[in-house]
Amino acid sequence: MERDMIIERTQAVKIFARQHNPNYKEGRPKRKKDSRNMAIFEYSNSHTVKEAAEAFNISPRTVQYIKKLFR
């Protein structure tokens, strides 16, 4: 009963938002591609992943993730 009321209210708000906001999107916002990530990406194109990670003091896995973002 309580759960149904919560779901009903939530759905009503979503419907209202869709009708009144043309830019309405559900879900988590996408991560932005900021200038730091762009610098890491450009650096990693001419250096190894390990070198880029050491230069920016981040993990190699993060460098790989950033390279994937910009593909």
Image (spheres, rainbow, N blue to C red):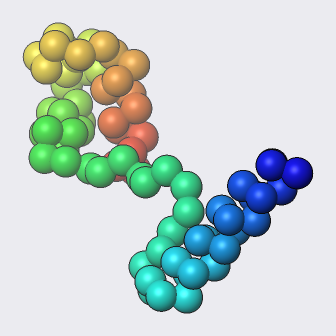
Residue in view at x 44 percent, y 83 percent: 21
The answer to which of 11 and 42 lies nearer the viewer is 11
Question: Seen in the image, is 56 located left or right of residue 69?
Answer: left
Q: Position of residue 32 (x, y in %)?
A: 29, 51
Residue 42, visible in the rendered structure: no
* Residue appearing at x 80%, y 48% in the figure: 3
Camera-nearest residue between 42 and 2: 2
Q: Is residue 63 above or below residue 33?
A: above
Number of labelled discs?
A: 0
Q: Which residue is depicted at the point 65% across and 62% down? A: 10
- Residue 62 vs residue 51: left or right? right
Q: Nearer the viewer, residue 9 or 69?
A: 9
User: Left or right: where does residue 15 sit relative to residue 47?
Assistant: right
Q: Classify 30 as above or below 50.
A: below
Residue that lies at the very extreme toward the right in this rendered image:
1
Q: Position of residue 30 (x, y in %)?
A: 42, 52
- Whether residue 64 is visible: yes
- The residue positioned 43% from the left and 54% from the top of the image is 29
Residue located farthest toward the front when viewing the structure as drawn = 1
- State left or right for residue 40 relative to residue 31: left
* Position of residue 60 measured from the top left corner of the image (x, y, whole percent): 33, 16
